[in-house]
Amino acid sequence: MKLLITGITTQSSIAYAVAEEAMKQGHEVILSNPPGRQLSILERIAKRLPAEPVDVLGLDVTDPDQVDAAAKAVAGHWDHLDGLLHSIAYAPAEALGGNFLETGWDDVAEAVHVSGYSLKALAVGFRDLMAEAPDGAGVVSLTFDASRAWPVYDWMGSAKAVLENSTKYLARDLGPQNIRVNALAAGPIKSLAGGSIPGFDRIADRWGESAPVGWDTSDATVVAGPALFLMSPAARGITGTTLHVDGGHHAMGAPVAGL
């Protein structure tokens, strides 16, 4: 498969685990991050992946011109795109950590734009390339179960709800072009993204107590296989859904107190 993977921030991130596993399986990968410091970090991290050199693109998903330019750049490498991983989330500190009632619209709007609306922007921006995939294409976004109100997650939770609901509408509107759109709700992984949320450890450290098969917050690789599956032709009949990869935590009726 030919895959575009966005949002690698550290070697412990889920997106990195997906890219690494994709390369081990022989898939081709292009990576992207916003221009500037995040792109420089990605260029360094990319050198640790098993296949080199890895093409890296500057892509700010809130800028339509950059989305168009990135799609043209990918089209310069490949004649189609089989899979796209949306691993992008950001909320200002004022929108997290117990500030739900005090958060102003500007901060909420930024969280929703980057973490939710950007899925639509990417899917539409790369639609023509994905429509050329011979076995259909799969868009996969990473979420954190938006069906519940989590401690400290606040407006990021609302942004993820936008992301998950957009998955259904994108599945409806892109399905006729044989483009599938799904979300993957992973359990908490202790990475840079999780560490940026005040009080995140309050959720992560007790997750395994309610996960029937346990949960290792340091192991992002458990998410890589399911993400690649959803982007592959093996998932050709699956679209518009959210797949939980969380040790079974979501299915339990008696969660840990406080979760």
Image (cartoon, helix red, strand yellow):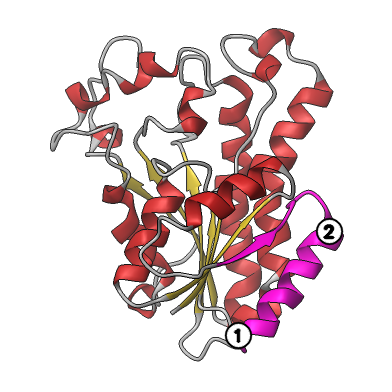
Q: Nearer the viewer, mark 2 or mark 1?
A: 1
- Residue at image x 63%, y 72%? 174
Residue 227: where, in percent of width, then height?
Answer: 38, 59
Could you classify mark 2 by the number of other residues whose Cα lies within 10 Å: few (under 14), some (14-19), or many (20 or more)? some
Q: Amino acid at mark 2?
A: Pro
Choose between 167 and 74: the one closer to the eye: 74
- Residue at image x 66%, y 65%? 123
- Residue at image x 53%, y 42%? 9
Are the residues at dot 2 and dot 1 in contact (C-beta closer than 8 Å)? no
Q: Can you see residue 116? A: yes
Q: Is residue 75 magenta?
A: yes
Could you classify mark 1 by the number of other residues whose Cα lies within 10 Å: few (under 14), some (14-19), or many (20 or more)? few
* C-alpha separation, residue under disc 2 versus residue under disc 1: 21 Å
Residue furthest to the right in view is 65
User: What range of the chain is rendered magenta?
Assistant: 55-79
Choose between 102 and 190: the one closer to the eye: 190
Residue 132: where, in percent of width, then height?
Answer: 60, 88
For mark 1, give the secondary structure: loop
The quarter of the rendered structure image containing the C terminus is: top left
Q: Which residue is mark 2?
A: 64
Q: Is residue 243 above or below residue 250?
A: below
Q: Which numbered marker is on residue 189?
A: none
Q: Is residue 225 magenta?
A: no
Residue 95: where, in percent of width, then height?
Answer: 67, 19
Q: On the image, which quarter does residue 220 sit in? A: top left
Q: Which residue is mark 1?
A: 78
Residue furthest to the left in view is 213
Q: Amino acid at mark 1?
A: Trp
